[in-house]
Image (cartoon, grey):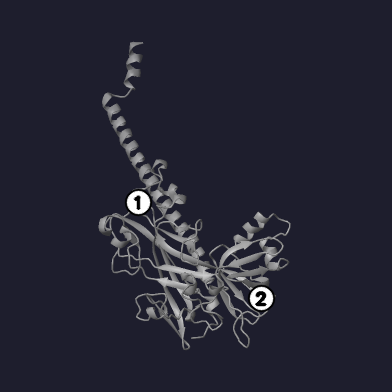
């Protein structure tokens, strides 16, 4: 029996063997843990980059659609359009005086500390067109009473049916429905029976059996034709059409001060990263006839947007020319002052370029600076490390509503 016990004990592990096995197992566990941690970090980085890319694609598609609609049911340039019957006066709202289908602005002030440190100055794009409705609403009559101009809409028409207007609805429901298109302080375009255009600013809208749009002071709005004249509304103008003109602005800026987007900067919820304090987004906002942003219309189109650049192709005396912001001819179409003469109606296409970054910096060095384009952006002081990857989207967008405009 004693020999058998000694034989059994001889098959066990020695202390040295146990120490080696434990050390090896601990080392292997550390390697597996490190690989799992790095894999998880890499996965999170790629997920954030994929989210930034997807957000940029969705936002860029929205931008492309809005640019393509610029000038829809409005004038390309109210200051030069021969089809506009009455030009706005100095007393007209600011945006009506210089109403144009689009306007590009090269900013002179920094958008954010980070973008300025990287030498990036995103452009601003203003668009005008019928964005809330694609319909032209037939009118029943236009009348004036002192300084009040009233545009009465026909009820039993296709545009009103598509809007969902019902004579049996309550007055509040009718007012809400009409206001969703013909909002207060938005620009109204009226095309009379002769094809001439007239512009005014909406003061109020009222539903009922005879829905009516009331305009601001008649001296700033529509003109009636004098005896022997060739310009102005004539008679009741039954069947003339009216539509709203929306003013849309795209720009890259921070939304940290906007209460609607406070959750993006809520540190308690763990949503704020180390480089979120100076983040910027591509936003879309509608403005009224005075140029004031309309409450509730601010939209975040693309998160972590860092650059927005535009160039254009213009038609001039039968020649198509592509012009960038640094071209000396840029001011011919977009002078520093919007009240200066411009030739926006000659534009035929825009080239838009939008760049968005990943939320987290994941590189310690920049790419070769001799390469053209924006591939990384420095999030550290003075645009230094760490660097975040950048995705850029670009498209040439035809301005279909400018296609037949050839007047000087």
In this view, 19 is above or below 173: above
What is the spatial separation of the Cα atoms under label 2 and label 1, in whole angstroms? 52 Å
Residue drawn where x is 35% and y is 39% of the image? 33
Does residue 131 appear anywhere in the picture?
A: no
Going from N to C along the chain, the mark reached first, 2 or 1, is 2
Q: Which of 250 and 360 lies nearest the eye of the viewer? A: 250
Q: Which mark is residue 245?
A: none
According to the picture, the residue beneath numbered tag 2 turns out to be 240
Secondary structure under tag 2 reads loop
Report x, y in % for residue 255: 41, 55
Disc 2 crowd, CA 10 A, few/some/many (<14, 14-19, 20+): many
Report x, y in % for residue 314: 45, 81
According to the picture, the residue beneath numbered tag 1 turns out to be 277
Residue drawn where x is 37% and y is 55% of the image? 279
Report x, y in % for residue 101: 50, 74
Report x, y in % for residue 120: 33, 65
Q: Quadrant of residue 326?
A: bottom left
Secondary structure under tag 1 reads loop
The quarter of the picture where the N terminus appears is: top left
Q: Residue furthest front?
A: 146
Residue 406 falls left or right of residue 255: right
Does residue 9 appear anywhere in the picture?
A: yes
Q: Which of 16 and 127 lies nearest the eye of the viewer? A: 127
Q: Which of 328 and 355 lies nearest the eye of the viewer? A: 328
């Amino acid at each position: 029996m004693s020999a058998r016990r000694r034989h059994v004990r001889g098959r066990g592990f020695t202390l040295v063997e146990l120490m080696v096995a434990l050390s090896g197992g601990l080392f292997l566990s550390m390697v597996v843990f490190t690989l799992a941690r790095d894999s998880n970090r890499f996965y999170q980085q790629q997920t954030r980059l994929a989210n930034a890319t997807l957000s940029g694609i969705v936002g860029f598609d929205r931008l492309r659609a809005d640019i393509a609609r610029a000038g829809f049911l409005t004038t390309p340039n109210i200051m030069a359009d021969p089809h506009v019957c009455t030009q706005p006066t100095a007393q007209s709202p600011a945006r009506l005086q210089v109403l144009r289908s689009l306007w590009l602005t090269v900013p002179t002030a920094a958008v954010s500390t980070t973008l300025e440190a990287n030498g990036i100055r995103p452009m601003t794009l203003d668009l005008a067109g019928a964005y809330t409705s694609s319909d032209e609403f037939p009118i029943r009559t236009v009348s004036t009473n002192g300084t009040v101009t009233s545009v009465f809409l026909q009820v039993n028409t296709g545009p009103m049916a598509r809007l969902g207007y019902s004579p049996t609805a309550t007055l509040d429901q009718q007012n809400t429905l009409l206001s969703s298109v013909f909002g207060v302080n938005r620009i109204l375009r009226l095309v009379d029976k002769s094809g001439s255009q007239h512009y005014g600013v909406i003061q109020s809208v009222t539903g009922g059996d005879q829905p009516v749009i009331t305009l601001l002071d008649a001296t700033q709005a529509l003109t009636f034709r004098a005896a022997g004249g060739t310009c102005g509304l004539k008679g009741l103008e039954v069947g003339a059409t009216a539509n709203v003109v929306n003013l849309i602005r795209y720009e890259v800026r921070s939304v940290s001060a906007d209460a609607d987007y406070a959750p993006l900067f809520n540190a308690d919820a763990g949503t704020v990263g180390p480089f979120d304090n100076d983040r910027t987004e591509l936003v879309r906002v509608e403005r009224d006839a005075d140029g004031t942003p309309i409450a509730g219309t601010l939209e975040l189109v693309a998160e972590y947007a860092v650059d927005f650049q535009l160039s254009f192709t213009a038609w001039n005396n039968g020649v198509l020319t592509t012009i960038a912001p640094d071209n000396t001819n840029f001011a011919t179409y977009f002078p520093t002052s919007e009240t200066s003469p411009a030739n926006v109606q000659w534009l035929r296409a825009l080239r838009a370029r939008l760049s968005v970054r990943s939320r987290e910096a994941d590189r310690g060095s920049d790419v070769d600076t001799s390469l053209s384009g924006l591939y990384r952006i420095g999030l550290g002081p003075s645009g230094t490390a760490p660097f975040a990857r950048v995705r850029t989207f670009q498209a040439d967008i035809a301005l279909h509503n400018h296609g037949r405009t050839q007047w000087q």
